[in-house]
Amino acid sequence: MAALFGRRMRRGAASTAVAAAAMAALSASGAPSAVGEQPAASAAERPSAGASGQEDPSVTGDSPYHTDLPPLKGPGRNDPPDETPATGSAESGIPATVLDAYRKAEASLAASNPRCRVPWELLAAIGKVESGHARGGRLDTNGTTPSPILGPVLNGVGFANISDTDGGAYDGDTLHDRAVGPMQFIPQTWESWGRDGNGDGRRDPNNIYDAALAAGSYLCAHDRDLTVERDLHQAILGYNRSQEYLRTVLHWYDYYRKGAHEVPDGSQPAPGAPTGTGGKTPSPAPVRPGTPSPSPTKPGKPDKPSKPGDGSSSKPTPPPTTPPPTPPPPTTPPPTTPAPATRLVDLGDGALSAPAGERFAERPAVRAERADKKPAAQAKVRFTLTGETGTTFEGGATTVTVTTKADGVAKAPALLAGGKPGALTVKATLLGTTEPVTLGLRGEVTAPRADKLVRTDETELTCEAGATFEGRIALTATRDGQAAPGVAATATVLAGADPADGEKAADQGPYFLTPGDEPAEDRRTRELTLTTDAKGNLLLPELHTDDTTGTFRLRVETTGGAVVVLELKVTDPA
């Protein structure tokens, strides 16, 4: 099926004159810049945004879209009647980073809005129709298009009439709005629905992670359940109010649900461009108007001999001498494509490790190598975090894709340890290979630490034998000047006032009581473990004494080596 675009026209634009004007506008402005100029789909079914009494404009401002249908099989199509896409077909391939963005958006929305149940295949269908999956996956390592994907100027000529709402910040146009990015948001809609899908702290409509999450959020609006057909259709029509658009998206949605596979980023031609021409259609050399075409020489008429006295020689004219052929200039052989990467090598010195809440000192790094064990440049490596520690890459993402340089090295962003100690794995996957190539890098989040511990109360630590110390001892743990929550600490009662007396727990003197129903005699302890609260505070239980008098020490130490030693005095009863 030839590539078509749906577009929005003013109500009643069914006349030949208006259709011709609309086609002229389409030829001048084009569809999104990823696509060539093609005939437009019917626009009479869509009202113009901004018309009197009309609802707010759709996500795209009803900009043009691709109306190519997937290569479905079935009776009448010269294909087996199984209605499924061919395994591994080009049309069912989705660029790796784009597919990752769709799936990540699905997972994020499943956690934040479980009622909606938005499937990634629906996002893929809209992404295919809006921009051909970000021009076939032409993205940088962060998932951003190298140049903006812009729809036509929405000036009311063949499309919606939407005056500028963003000062040209997103679309570069200070007079009218234009749809922007892989999911084709108009600026005013992006301001309401834009999301940060890759955790870099920005909402960028040109980033596939941000745009996919924003599209999913919009589809889930109004408490929709996308497993309900009515809600599904309303969501798609909200994206672009066109029955033709709805049918096209549903065709691709059904197609991707029956099977899709990952392909390398940028391996597919940009939508609308003929395959194998680099996006340009070769054309013959131009002929200027008025230039006569060369006429062929008629055979059979010899040249007239020259006459004497007319200024020409009576001698026969010798035939022209043909110059020796000039050898063609030496040609530069075309560059050879380097062999693809076939394996990954771990460049780490050991297990990745960091205390909870802190930055890992080492970044995950691998080297992509070819079959001859030489470095492979321009290979794409995806790093994915697994585990229950809450660890993320810097910026909040749990999946990032990195392109190797000339040395074949791919280094992930810094890791930020989550708040829960435990094991984690950083899975490195080499993209674009026929057989899966993965490497698991093991890591660990250890207990949080503190580098300073101070006492915050001023109660005198003196008590009579057989009594209880007044008040409870309070301390605060910090790390780099900030409160250190969740830090483990041990409190131990030591015999004697001098460190020379040893660091072993005393067998008499002050003691704590552990919780329980047993008699107090059975619950005495002179060594216990505690954890700081959310503000880094540590409040010790009440401290009791037996009948032993003298001077003792209370040593409190946290994970990370912060220590406080307090002196305890037990006197004779009054």
Image: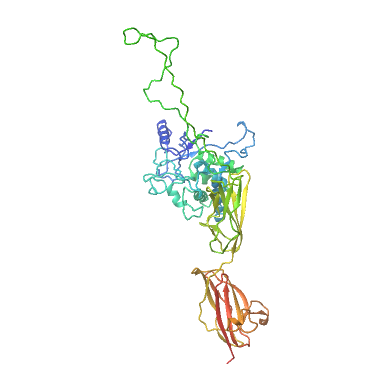
For this rendering, which residue is in front, 328 or 459? 328
Which quarter of the figure is the N terminus placed in?
A: top right
Task: Work out which residue is located at the far bottom of the displayed protein and give it.
Answer: 574
Q: Quadrant of residue 82?
A: top right
For residue 380, above or below residue 501 = above
Residue 338 in view in this figure: yes
For residue 252, above or below residue 422 = above
Tell me which colouring the rendered structure shows: rainbow
Task: Work out which residue is located at the far top of the displayed protein and give it.
Answer: 308
Residue at 48% over, 43% down = 240
Q: In which quarter of the image is residue 24?
A: top left
For this rendering, which residue is in front, 501 or 37? 501
Q: In which quarter of the image is residue 362?
A: bottom right
Give residue 21's position: percent from left, percent from top: 40, 33
For residue 149, above or below residue 383 = above
Residue at 45% over, 49% down = 189
Residue 105 in view in this figure: no
Give residue 515's position: percent from left, percent from top: 64, 76
Give residue 40's position: percent from left, percent from top: 46, 35
Which quarter of the figure is the C terminus placed in?
A: bottom right
Give the number of callouts: 0
Give residue 439's position: percent from left, percent from top: 62, 52
For this rendering, which residue is in front, 211 or 269? 269
